[in-house]
Image (cartoon, rainbow, N blue to C red):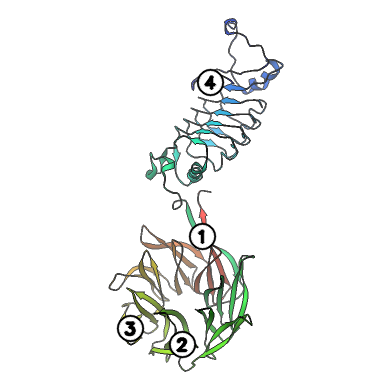
Amino acid sequence: PGVWGSGSHRGLLLTIPGCRMTPMSQAKALRPAPLTQHFLKETKATFCSSFVPRSLVNGTFLEIKDRMFSHLPSLQLLLLNSNSFTVIRDDAFAGLFHLEYLFIEGNKIETISRNAFRGLRDLTHLSLANNHIKALPRDVFSDLDSLIELDLRGNKFECDCKAKWLYLWLKMTNSTVSDVLCIGPPEYQEKKLNDVTSFDYECTTTDFVVHQTLPYQSVSVDTFSSKNDVYVAIAQPSMENCMVLEWDHIEMNFRSYDNITGQSIVGCKAILIDDQVFVVVAQLFGGSHIYKYDESWTKFVKFQDVEVSRISKPNDIELFQIDDEKFFVIADSSKAGLSTVYKWNSKGFYSYQSLHEWFRDTDAEFVDIDGKSHLILSSRSQVPIILQWNKSSKKFVPHSDIPNMEDVLAVKSFRMQSSLYLSLTRFIGDSRVMRWNNKQFVEVQALPSRGAMTLQPFSFKDNHYLALGSDYTFSQIYQWDKEKQLFVKFKEIYVQAPRSFTAVSTDRRDFFFASSFKGKTKIFEHIIVDLSL
């Protein structure tokens, strides 16, 4: 091996097996030759016939070009200290298959290309100490299979998303690596990169991308699971169908499974009771019906009718359970309509309670408020009313209302960080987000929503969203901002006349169905985007 030089030494020492070296006592007449690229090219031909250098120490270079040392394939030690170059380009050390020690210290390096160290599979020691490095490209050390020690001291690393890969690599590598100090961002200043808790929050975001487009119109989408499979029921009034789709685990998309026909179907809601699957099919004409899945026929067959005299113009179906008993309520939006609660009695569903009439109910939402069961009914003709379940009579009784919220089309409940929220959809004026404060619902946020027919909350893990569907403009997805404690605009999506948004999860993937009254039904996939890539 060669002789190690100090960081400031500008001389050159080549160890050359097979050559007769001149003793220093006889070398008074020798003049030092500057190490230049021309010198490196010509030395082999002029120095001695058996020139096989093993070490190159502290030469002076202005830049490091690709394959600059490829004509010295036997090098085992290369010191490039105290130069002034700022860049190390791809394949700078190509051809140095036997290189074990590479020291590039005390230079002005700012940029290192991703493939700068490609091919250095025998390299055991690498030092990039005391340069101006702020970031390293992803997988820059991927070819260094034999690396034992890495020195990154004396650089100015920005410990942002670009450093995430290095943070993960430091956790996994078997090499001994010097401390990597951060100069930024401010919250990490003077900290060691290894001491950063995680980059997951800062370096990831989410997005919605179109996964599948269904070539038909729809007004509502419901999802249910049965025997480890995921299904979706889509109401298609113009096609007079309730289309049932299933998730294809091989093709990774939603495919047709069954089709329930009817007249002007506006809602398909699945009910799972023990091992049985029922679908309530709400129709504008011909009455509403309940279908049951028949395993022998592998399809849904008609199970019972819903009384025509009670339901004239169904607008919403809501399922709920109280004390292990199964119910559903149909909100009737006709002027003489009678919103009705139905109960399962082990043989079928029967009308259990008529809620009120003459109010043109557009939506019903079951909510647990402080451990008590409630129904919130929204209406074209009054503010949303809150009914509370009376445990003695086992009926819903009027309890309160949500004041100053006329003409609410729909109310949806959701929870975040153990708090109860409501989203209230309004076609004219602003829609609202409200929160329960242990006494009443108070306004959190108003959302401009001219032409809105739905404001749907949904969540995927710790990401909470609101989808606002409008007939007059692009639909808007809002995301909950934990710091601001508000929903902020996240993404616009184009869906013609959206009527419902439904979250569906399967095979560790998350989807978002957007029904369209005038166009094609779209399925968006919720994806995680790594900003460090």
Residue that label 3 marks: 391
- Sequence-wise, the earlier of marks 3 and 4 is 4
- Sequence-wise, the earlier of marks 2 and 3 is 2
State the separation of the CA atoms marked 2 and 1. Answer: 44 Å
Q: Residue at x 47, y 90 (%)?
A: 312
Residue that label 4 marks: 4
**What number is the disc on residue 207?**
1
Q: Which residue is drawn at 57% across and 18% down?
A: 12
State the separation of the CA atoms marked 2 and 3. Answer: 18 Å
**What number is the disc on residue 345?**
2
Residue type pointed to by label 1: Asp
Q: Under tag 1, what secondary structure?
A: strand
Residue type pointed to by label 3: Lys
Task: Answer yes or no: is residue 520 visible.
Answer: yes
- Sequence-wise, the earlier of marks 1 and 4 is 4
Q: Where is residue 306 in the image (x, y as percent from the top left)?
A: 50, 90
- Sequence-wise, the earlier of marks 1 and 3 is 1
Marks 1/3 in contact by CB < 8 Å: the verdict is no
Residue type pointed to by label 4: Trp
Where does the N terminus fall, quadrant-wise? top right
Label 3 environment density (alpha carbons within 10 Å; few <14, some 14–19, many ≥20): few
- Sequence-wise, the earlier of marks 2 and 1 is 1
Q: Under tag 4, what secondary structure?
A: loop
Label 4 environment density (alpha carbons within 10 Å; few <14, some 14–19, many ≥20): some
Q: Out of 145 and 47, give the one closest to the viewer.
A: 145
